[in-house]
Image: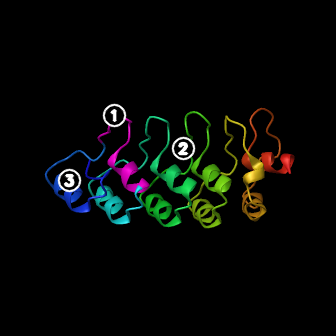
Amino acid sequence: MACYNNDLTTTSVLLRAGAYPNSCNKFGQTPLLLAVRKYNVAMVKELIGAGVDVNKMEQEGLSALMMCCDDGNSEMAKLLLDYQANPDLQQSETGYTALMFACKGGHLDTVIGLMEHGADAKIRNVAPTEPSQVPWSLLNMLLHNQPDWTSSSWRTLFLSTLQDH
């Protein structure tokens, strides 16, 4: 509840008193996911210091990194990546990775940060990609990271974009 209310002081007190940082609310959201949604960098750092699992996903299969990338919050994404957030986890329903969320939103700084941390641009998603939403400025970034030109069933973000433009 403290993270939901964006209350860093109470969050810190609870963590020092032994609160489990990976607990979930009834929606499967961890304190980290709530802090990311509130754009609270200090709270995210506090939770990381308490040993939070930066790769834990909520009920809908979204990780904290995916949420940051979808919102274009490159500062928070970099922080999570610096603490071993996996850029290649896939959302359970769509198969989107953090990179796909960042590309779809046109968040170039976030895409660059993900690529610098080793995000795989060749991972295929499950749901159809909406390439018309991917800005051309991001295509160059993907092109220089060895796109998979020959995917036959699922399509990579790069291939989808080329075929639909």
- Write the start and end of the magenta stretch as one range: 23-37
Task: Say which of marks 2 and 1 sits in front.
Answer: 1
Could you tell me which secondary element the residue under label 1 belongs to?
A: loop
Q: Is residue 135 above or below residue 62?
A: below
In this rendering, position of residue 62 left or right of residue 106: left
Q: Residue at x 73, y 55 (%)?
A: 134
Q: Position of residue 53 (x, y in %)?
A: 36, 47
Callout 2: helix, strand or loop?
A: loop
The type of residue carrying mark 2 is Leu
Packing grade of label 3 (10 A; few <14, some 14-19, many >=20) is some
- The dot on residue 164 is none
Mark before the other along the chain sequence, 3 or 2:
3
- Write down the residue under mark 3: 15
The residue beneath circle 1 is 26
Judge whether residue 31 is colored magenta: yes
**Could you say which is closer to the camera, residue 26 or residue 142?**
26
